[in-house]
Amino acid sequence: MSEQVHIQDSTVAYGQIFKHLTRSGFAVLKNRGGVSLDQGISRARKVQSDSVLPKTVDVVVIGAGNIGSLTALTLVERGLKVVLCEKGSVAGESSGRSLGYIESLFSDRVKLEMVARAKVLWKDIDQRVQGPTGYVKTGSVTGFLSEEGLAAAEDWVNTVKDIEGIDGYIMTKTELKEKSYHWKEDFVGGLHQPSDACAEPQHFASSVAEAFRAKGGQLFQNCAVGEILTQAGKVIGVATELGEIKCHSVVLAGGAWTPYLAKSLGLDLPQFMAFASIARVGSSAIDLNRFEMNQKFPLISAESDIAVRYSSQNSVDICAPAVRLPITVNMLKNMPKLMQALVAMQGQFSPVFDINTLKFEYKNMHSYKANGLAPLQKYRVLVPEVFTPPLNDAIQRYTDYTADHQRTLQESWAGFLTTTPDHLPYLSQVDSISGLFIGSGFYNGLTVAPAAAEALADLVMQRTPKIDLALFRFNRFMNGSPIIFRP
C-alpha cells in the first residue's frame, strides 16, 4: 500500500517534499547524469510521407507514436478522412525506444480492463496491419529472490485473478528454471503470465503508419503543429508548419510534448517524464535462435533490477530499471500533486536536478506557446542521454547469470517514460473545447496501445467505449478530489 500524502499549504508541501526525498535516499543533487536532452536519431524503421497537405479532413491526429498511429489507423478504418501529423518521424521518440514488453506486472485493477482489452486486439494485429510488428505471444517470467517478494506477487495474483484476460500464476523454483533457460540466479520462485507478449518497437508503429496510408490516411512527418485552431469553443482546424488544415476533431497524442501543446489552449495537464536506458547485446556463446520464437520468454529479475527481452539475430535487449526523473519546471509547478507518486515510486525513480536540463525544458518546452514552432522544428527527435553506470551493471549481471562471456555490446539507447500524478493516463475528450481529445501519459503505452486507440476513436465518433474511461478524464486533477496513486 502506497503512502498517502495530503497537502494543502504550498509552503508545507515543499517542506514535506524535501523531507520525503531526503528520507527516501533520493540523490537529487549528488547523483547526476542520465537526464540531459538533445536532438537525436530515430531508431524506428523509416516510413514514407505524403506530399500534398489537404485543406479539409475529418480528424487530425497529432503525434505518430504507438497511440497516435493506431488511433489514426482505427479512424480511417471506420471511414473517416484522417491526417496524422508528426513533428519528426514515426515513433522517433519514446515509442521507438522502449524495451518491447506487452505486460501488466503488478498493475492496479483499474488499469487491467484496458490491458485485457488490448491483449484481445493484439492477437489480430499482424493480420490487421499486414506488416512486420514483431508481435509474439511469449508469456513473461518474473523471478523473485526473497520469500517476501514472492508473497507480494502471490497477493497481487489473488487480487486480480477474477479479471478476464489476466492469467498470472505462481511458479515453483523448479518450474521457474525451466522457463528461464536455467538463469543462474538463486530465485525462490516466480510469476508466469502466459498472455503477456512482445513487439518490436523499431517496426511496430512504422507498420501501423504504413497500414494507415494504405487504407487512405495521409501522413506528414517533419510537420509540427504549431496551433490547434478553435472558434466559439470548438475545434476548427490546426496550423502546421506546412499550412493549415480544417477539421472538426483533433486527437492530441504528443507524448512528452502533450502538456505544452495543451498549455497553448489554456489547459493544465500535470504530467512528468522519466528516462530509461536499454542496451542490445549480441552473443556467439548462446544460440538464441535454437529456441522457437514463442518460447523466448521476456525475463524480469524483480529484485536485482534487470529485465531482458530476447530479440532476433542472437541479440538480447537488457534494461536496468534505474529510471531517471529530471526535475523540470512542469514538475516543480505540480510538485504537490506529484508528491504521492514520487513517494510511491521511490524505488523506481531517481529524481535528478540538472540546471542545464531545467533551462532546456523551460526554454524549449515550457515556453512552447511563446516560442511557437521553433523548438518542435529544432528537436525533431528529442532523446535523453544514456545513463551508463546501472546499464553496465545490468550487462555484467546478465553475463554472470548466463555464463555468456562472449557477449558484445551492439548499441545502447534511452527513451522517455511519461506518467501523471496518479499514474493513470489521460484518455478523454476535453469538455471545454468541443472536438478535442487527449491520449497521453501512458507509462506502458505499447501494452495498451490497441485498446487506447480504439477508445479514442470511439470518443471521436461519439460511440460508447468498450472500457470504462471515468478515471482517465483529463480534468480529474482540477476539482480538488483526492489523488489516489495507482501502481
Image (cartoon, helix red, strand yellow):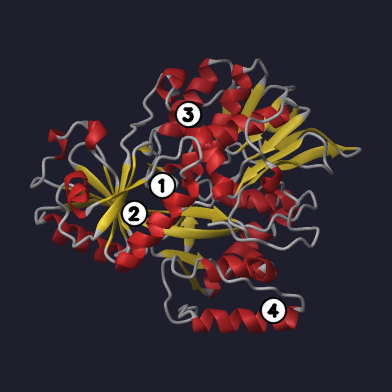
Q: Name the residue under label 2.
A: 278
The answer to which of marks 4 and 3 sits earlier in the sequence is: 4
Q: Is residue 392 above or below residue 418?
A: below
The answer to which of marks 2 and 1 sits earlier in the sequence is: 1
Mark 4 lies on a secondary structure that is: helix
- The foreground one among 335 and 219 is 335
How many neighbours does mark 3 have within 10 angstroms: few (below 14), some (14-19), or many (20 or more)? Answer: some
The answer to which of marks 1 and 4 sits earlier in the sequence is: 4
Do tag 4 and tag 2 residues touch (Cβ < 8 Å)?
A: no
Which dot, 4 or 2, sits closer to the camera? 4
Spatial separation of the CA atoms under disc 3 and disc 1: 21 Å
Do tag 3 and tag 1 residues touch (Cβ < 8 Å)?
A: no
Q: What residue type is labelled 1?
A: Ser
Q: In which quarter of the image is residue 320?
A: bottom left
Mark 1 lies on a secondary structure that is: loop
Which dot, 2 or 3, sits closer to the camera? 3
- The foreground one among 309 and 257 is 309
Mark 3 lies on a secondary structure that is: helix
Q: Which amino acid does label 4 sit on?
A: Ala
Spatial separation of the CA atoms under disc 2 and disc 1: 8 Å
Q: Classify residue 265 as left or right of residue 243.
A: right
Does residue 386 show up? Answer: no
Q: Mark 4 points at which residue?
A: 13
Q: What residue type is labelled 3?
A: Val
| Image location (x, y in percent) of residue 37 | 49, 60
Q: Mark 3 points at which residue?
A: 120
Q: In this view, does 209 lie above or below 397?
A: above
Q: Which amino acid does label 2 sit on?
A: Ile
- The foreground one among 199 and 380 is 199
Q: Classify residue 220 as left or right of residue 33.
A: right
Q: In which quarter of the image is residue 315?
A: top left
